[in-house]
Image (spheres, rainbow, N blue to C red):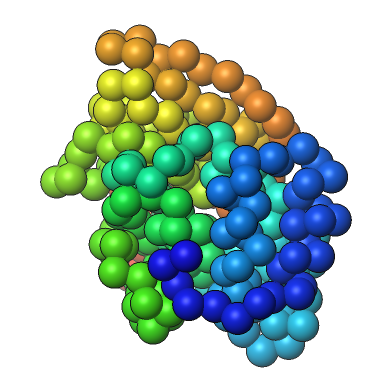
Amino acid sequence: MKGKFLKNERAHMMVKSQILTRGVTDPRVLEVMRAVPRHLFVSGKNRDVAYGDYPISIGHDQTISQPYIVSYMTQALALRGTEKVLEIGTGSGYQTAILAELARQVYTVEIVEPLSVYARRLLEALGYDNIAFRCGDGSEGWDEFAPYDCIMVTAAAPSIPVALKRQLADNGIMVIPVGDYRQYQELTVVRRLGNKYQIEEKLGCRFVPLVQAEKAKEGERWKNRPSSR
Ligand code: SAH
């Protein structure tokens, strides 16, 4: 384990009752899910329910994903410890910690600056030195360090962003929720084989939307327009 953690009874229970029962079996994934202190990634009263079987608010209209979904998406990447991984949607940084335990290097992009700053501080305090943070629009990926062996997107996109497909290495795996953010989405696993992309829809899920920077800017312009001429 890269982070230094005390034995965590609540995380053991979480794995036993929510994750093993639903068929996630990769022993490396189970081990880190038992170790990483999920309660540190939420605040205030939410710490009491941090190991519950649901997503939890982390402020800024965002949520930390349900433990089962974190384990499922992580298992889908089949990490062995040598990979360079791109994560879109740092959020609380919980999923980032799980990836940092299981891969060689993680690049994580978050569009809400305070979330990015907070996650960075926490993950650095926990001792992770294999995570690079960026604040910006993750639907463009992070071109500078491409290609990535794995890409994980933790916000829903109407379709798979072209930039992310391009930044995925040959034989690489991407996991991304695809669909309308107001409804259920399909958790989708994409494997790149040369210039072909093999696409498998795995299960229904519900994520917050992947904000597109251009649209967000338009919203700002609209909001800030002069109210009278
Ligand atoms: N893995 C995180 C999930 C957070 S929710 C966790 O478990 O804590 C999804 C996150 O994606 C939010 O923090 C949201 O701000 C971020 N997000 C939404 N659109 C984005 C975009 N275009 N680029 C980067 N991050 C984005």
Q: How many labels does the image show?
A: 0
| Residue 85 coordinates in the image, percent (x, y) | 34, 45
Q: In terms of depth relative to the viewer, which is nearer, 67 or 90? A: 67
Residue 172: x, y in percent?
Answer: 36, 27
Tell me what residue is drawn at x 48 percent, y 29 percent: 159
Left or right side of 143 for 14: right
- Residue drawn at x 32%, y 51% is 104
Residue nearest the observer in this picture, 121 or 77: 77
Give the image quarter of residue 133.
bottom left
Quarter holding the C terminus is bottom left
Along the viewing direction, whichever of 208 and 70 lies nearer the viewer: 70
Q: Position of residue 25 (x, y in %)?
A: 69, 40
* 199 to the left or right of 52: left
**Dividing the picture into quarters, in which one does residue 132 lie?**
bottom left
Q: Which of 63 and 179 is in front in this view?
A: 63
Against 46, residue 61 (above or below) is above
Check the image and report above or below for 83 versus 101: above
Whether residue 93 is situated above or below residue 42 in the rendered picture: above
* Whether residue 165 is visible: yes
> In which quadrant of the rendered view does residue 35 lie?
bottom right
Please indicate, yes or no, whether residue 162 appears anywhere in the rendered image. Answer: no
Where is 5 relative to 72, above or below? below
Question: In the image, 48: left or right of 222?
Answer: right
Q: Where is residue 77 in the image (x, y as percent from the top left)?
A: 49, 36
Q: Which residue is drawn at 27% across and 28% down?
A: 169
Residue placed furthest toward the bottom = 44
Point 61% across, 56% down: residue:
31
Q: In this view, does 158 lie to the left or right of 65?
A: left
